[in-house]
Image (spheres, rainbow, N blue to C red):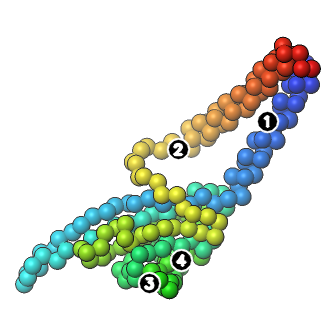
Amino acid sequence: MDLGLWGVAAQIVCSVLFGAAVTYRLQRPRLIAYYGHVAAHAVDQSNGPQARFHTHSVIIKNTGWAAAHHVRATHGGLVSNVFVYPDVPHRKDALPNGTEDLVFDVLVPGQQIEISYVYGPHVTFNQITQQIRSDEGMAKFMPAQITPQLQGWRRNLVICLFFLGCITTLYFGFFALRWIISVSGLL
Protein backbone atom coordinates (compact mmCIF):
# COMPACT_ATOMS: atom_id res chain seq x y z
CA MET A 1 0.00 0.00 0.00
CA ASP A 2 1.49 3.28 -1.10
CA LEU A 3 0.74 6.02 1.44
CA GLY A 4 2.33 8.80 -0.51
CA LEU A 5 3.94 11.89 0.89
CA TRP A 6 0.91 12.99 2.94
CA GLY A 7 0.52 9.57 4.56
CA VAL A 8 4.18 9.46 5.58
CA ALA A 9 3.98 13.04 6.89
CA ALA A 10 0.88 12.16 8.92
CA GLN A 11 2.64 9.17 10.49
CA ILE A 12 5.71 11.25 11.37
CA VAL A 13 3.67 14.09 12.88
CA CYS A 14 1.55 11.65 14.91
CA SER A 15 4.65 9.91 16.21
CA VAL A 16 6.27 13.21 17.20
CA LEU A 17 3.10 14.45 18.93
CA PHE A 18 2.67 11.18 20.80
CA GLY A 19 6.33 11.21 21.87
CA ALA A 20 6.06 14.82 23.07
CA ALA A 21 2.91 14.04 25.07
CA VAL A 22 4.51 11.03 26.75
CA THR A 23 7.70 12.96 27.51
CA TYR A 24 5.72 15.85 29.02
CA ARG A 25 3.74 13.40 31.17
CA LEU A 26 6.90 11.61 32.35
CA GLN A 27 8.68 14.77 33.43
CA ARG A 28 6.02 16.12 35.83
CA PRO A 29 4.53 15.12 39.14
CA ARG A 30 0.79 15.58 39.50
CA LEU A 31 -0.53 16.18 42.99
CA ILE A 32 -4.19 15.63 43.72
CA ALA A 33 -5.89 16.09 47.08
CA TYR A 34 -9.33 15.32 48.41
CA TYR A 35 -11.17 15.19 51.72
CA GLY A 36 -11.50 11.68 53.10
CA HIS A 37 -14.07 12.58 55.72
CA VAL A 38 -15.38 15.60 57.62
CA ALA A 39 -17.18 14.92 60.90
CA ALA A 40 -18.37 16.40 64.18
CA HIS A 41 -18.38 14.24 67.33
CA ALA A 42 -19.95 14.46 70.78
CA VAL A 43 -18.49 12.33 73.56
CA ASP A 44 -20.42 11.72 76.78
CA GLN A 45 -18.45 12.43 79.92
CA SER A 46 -19.36 10.82 83.23
CA ASN A 47 -19.03 14.01 85.27
CA GLY A 48 -20.13 16.81 82.98
CA PRO A 49 -21.49 17.98 79.65
CA GLN A 50 -20.66 16.37 76.34
CA ALA A 51 -17.25 17.09 74.89
CA ARG A 52 -17.53 18.22 71.28
CA PHE A 53 -14.80 18.07 68.67
CA HIS A 54 -14.40 18.00 64.89
CA THR A 55 -12.24 15.79 62.66
CA HIS A 56 -11.36 15.62 59.02
CA SER A 57 -8.76 14.01 56.81
CA VAL A 58 -7.03 15.12 53.64
CA ILE A 59 -5.53 12.61 51.23
CA ILE A 60 -2.64 13.76 49.03
CA LYS A 61 -1.49 11.58 46.14
CA ASN A 62 1.19 11.97 43.50
CA THR A 63 -0.44 10.56 40.36
CA GLY A 64 2.36 11.77 38.07
CA TRP A 65 5.41 9.86 36.89
CA ALA A 66 8.00 12.06 38.64
CA ALA A 67 8.68 12.75 42.31
CA ALA A 68 7.11 15.83 43.94
CA HIS A 69 9.55 17.72 46.17
CA HIS A 70 8.81 19.74 49.33
CA VAL A 71 5.08 19.05 49.43
CA ARG A 72 3.51 21.61 51.77
CA ALA A 73 0.06 21.50 53.37
CA THR A 74 -0.64 25.01 54.67
CA HIS A 75 -2.84 25.25 57.78
CA GLY A 76 -4.90 28.22 58.89
CA GLY A 77 -3.39 28.15 62.39
CA LEU A 78 -1.12 26.13 64.61
CA VAL A 79 -2.54 22.61 64.62
CA SER A 80 -1.36 20.33 67.40
CA ASN A 81 -3.42 17.16 66.83
CA VAL A 82 -2.25 15.87 63.45
CA PHE A 83 -1.78 12.23 62.47
CA VAL A 84 -0.05 11.24 59.21
CA TYR A 85 -0.59 7.80 57.69
CA PRO A 86 1.53 6.05 56.63
CA ASP A 87 4.14 7.30 59.03
CA VAL A 88 6.44 9.20 56.66
CA PRO A 89 9.06 11.76 57.67
CA HIS A 90 7.62 15.27 57.88
CA ARG A 91 8.11 18.51 59.77
CA LYS A 92 6.08 21.54 60.79
CA ASP A 93 7.28 24.96 59.66
CA ALA A 94 5.73 27.94 61.48
CA LEU A 95 5.10 30.89 59.17
CA PRO A 96 5.31 34.58 60.17
CA ASN A 97 1.56 35.16 59.70
CA GLY A 98 0.61 32.65 62.42
CA THR A 99 -0.08 29.73 60.09
CA GLU A 100 2.06 26.65 59.60
CA ASP A 101 3.10 24.27 56.87
CA LEU A 102 3.24 20.52 57.23
CA VAL A 103 6.19 19.67 54.94
CA PHE A 104 6.97 16.32 53.29
CA ASP A 105 10.37 16.28 51.59
CA VAL A 106 9.35 14.01 48.71
CA LEU A 107 6.32 12.12 47.41
CA VAL A 108 7.37 9.47 44.91
CA PRO A 109 5.09 8.58 41.97
CA GLY A 110 2.03 6.70 43.18
CA GLN A 111 2.62 7.54 46.84
CA GLN A 112 -0.42 8.55 48.87
CA ILE A 113 -0.54 10.02 52.36
CA GLU A 114 -3.45 10.80 54.63
CA ILE A 115 -3.39 13.66 57.11
CA SER A 116 -6.01 13.40 59.87
CA TYR A 117 -6.92 16.32 62.15
CA VAL A 118 -8.72 16.64 65.49
CA TYR A 119 -9.74 20.12 66.68
CA GLY A 120 -12.26 22.00 68.77
CA PRO A 121 -15.85 22.86 67.83
CA HIS A 122 -15.13 26.52 67.13
CA VAL A 123 -13.04 25.62 64.04
CA THR A 124 -14.26 24.13 60.74
CA PHE A 125 -12.35 22.00 58.24
CA ASN A 126 -11.96 24.78 55.65
CA GLN A 127 -10.15 26.92 58.24
CA ILE A 128 -7.53 24.21 58.81
CA THR A 129 -6.40 23.00 55.38
CA GLN A 130 -5.88 26.04 53.15
CA GLN A 131 -3.69 24.90 50.26
CA ILE A 132 -1.37 22.12 49.19
CA ARG A 133 1.61 22.77 46.94
CA SER A 134 5.05 21.49 46.02
CA ASP A 135 8.12 22.93 44.34
CA GLU A 136 6.65 21.80 41.02
CA GLY A 137 3.19 23.38 41.41
CA MET A 138 -0.14 23.41 43.21
CA ALA A 139 -2.16 20.34 44.10
CA LYS A 140 -5.58 20.04 42.55
CA PHE A 141 -8.43 19.46 45.01
CA MET A 142 -10.74 16.83 43.59
CA PRO A 143 -14.23 15.93 44.77
CA ALA A 144 -14.13 12.41 46.19
CA GLN A 145 -16.42 9.95 44.47
CA ILE A 146 -16.44 6.24 45.21
CA THR A 147 -16.31 4.36 41.89
CA PRO A 148 -14.97 0.96 40.87
CA GLN A 149 -11.56 1.21 39.26
CA LEU A 150 -10.43 -0.75 36.22
CA GLN A 151 -7.48 -2.96 37.07
CA GLY A 152 -4.68 -4.57 35.11
CA TRP A 153 -5.21 -5.37 31.46
CA ARG A 154 -8.63 -3.65 31.27
CA ARG A 155 -7.15 -0.30 32.24
CA ASN A 156 -4.25 -0.73 29.80
CA LEU A 157 -6.69 -1.66 27.03
CA VAL A 158 -8.73 1.53 27.60
CA ILE A 159 -5.56 3.65 27.51
CA CYS A 160 -4.34 1.98 24.31
CA LEU A 161 -7.74 2.42 22.62
CA PHE A 162 -7.79 6.09 23.63
CA PHE A 163 -4.39 6.77 22.06
CA LEU A 164 -5.27 4.69 19.00
CA GLY A 165 -8.36 6.85 18.54
CA CYS A 166 -6.30 10.05 18.88
CA ILE A 167 -3.76 8.86 16.32
CA THR A 168 -6.50 7.74 13.92
CA THR A 169 -8.24 11.12 14.22
CA LEU A 170 -5.01 12.95 13.43
CA TYR A 171 -4.25 10.61 10.54
CA PHE A 172 -7.63 11.13 8.89
CA GLY A 173 -7.45 14.84 9.71
CA PHE A 174 -4.35 15.09 7.53
CA PHE A 175 -6.17 13.33 4.70
CA ALA A 176 -9.10 15.73 5.09
CA LEU A 177 -6.72 18.69 5.06
CA ARG A 178 -5.04 17.30 1.95
CA TRP A 179 -8.43 16.93 0.23
CA ILE A 180 -9.48 20.48 1.20
CA ILE A 181 -6.21 21.89 -0.16
CA SER A 182 -6.55 19.93 -3.43
CA VAL A 183 -10.20 21.00 -3.92
CA SER A 184 -9.47 24.65 -3.18
CA GLY A 185 -6.55 24.65 -5.62
CA LEU A 186 -3.96 25.95 -3.15
CA LEU A 187 -1.37 23.43 -4.31
Earlier-in-chain disc, 3 versus 4: 3
Q: Does residue 165 appear in the picture of this structure?
A: yes
- Mark 1–mark 4 Cα distance, whole angstroms, equals 41 Å
Q: Nearer the viewer, mark 3 or mark 4?
A: 3
Task: Give the Cα distance between marks 1 and 3.
Answer: 52 Å
- Give, as a three-letter code, the residue at label 1: Cys
Say which label, 1 or 3, has the lower sequence index. 1
Amino acid type, label 2: Gln
Do residues under tags 4 and 2 come within 8 Å of each other at their CB atoms?
no
The circle on residue 14 is 1
User: Disc 3 designates what residue?
Assistant: 98
Q: Earlier in the sequence, mark 3 or mark 2?
A: 3
Horizontal side of 49 relative to 72 (left or right) equals left
Judged by depth in the image, the label closer to the viewer, 4 or 2, is: 4
User: How many C-alpha atoms fall within 10 Å of the one at disc 3: few (<14), some, or many (≥20)?
Assistant: few
Q: Residue beneath label 4, please?
A: 103
How many angstroms separate mark 1 from mark 2 (CA)? 28 Å
Mark 4 neighbour class, 10 Å CA radius: few under 14, some 14 to 19, many 20 or more:
many
Residue type for callout 4: Val
Q: Locate residue 136, reporting x and y percent.
A: 65, 66
Q: Position of residue 97 (x, y in %)?
A: 47, 83
- Whether residue 1 is visible to the viewer of this picture, yes or no, is no
Which badge, 4 or 2, comes first in the chain's sequence? 4
What residue does disc 2 label?
151
Q: Earlier in the sequence, mark 1 or mark 2?
A: 1
- Comparing marks 3 and 2, which lies closer to the viewer? 3
| Quadrant housing residue 70 | bottom right
Mark 1 or mark 2, whichever is nearer to me: 1
- Residue at coordinates 42% horizontally, 44% vertically from top-left? 147
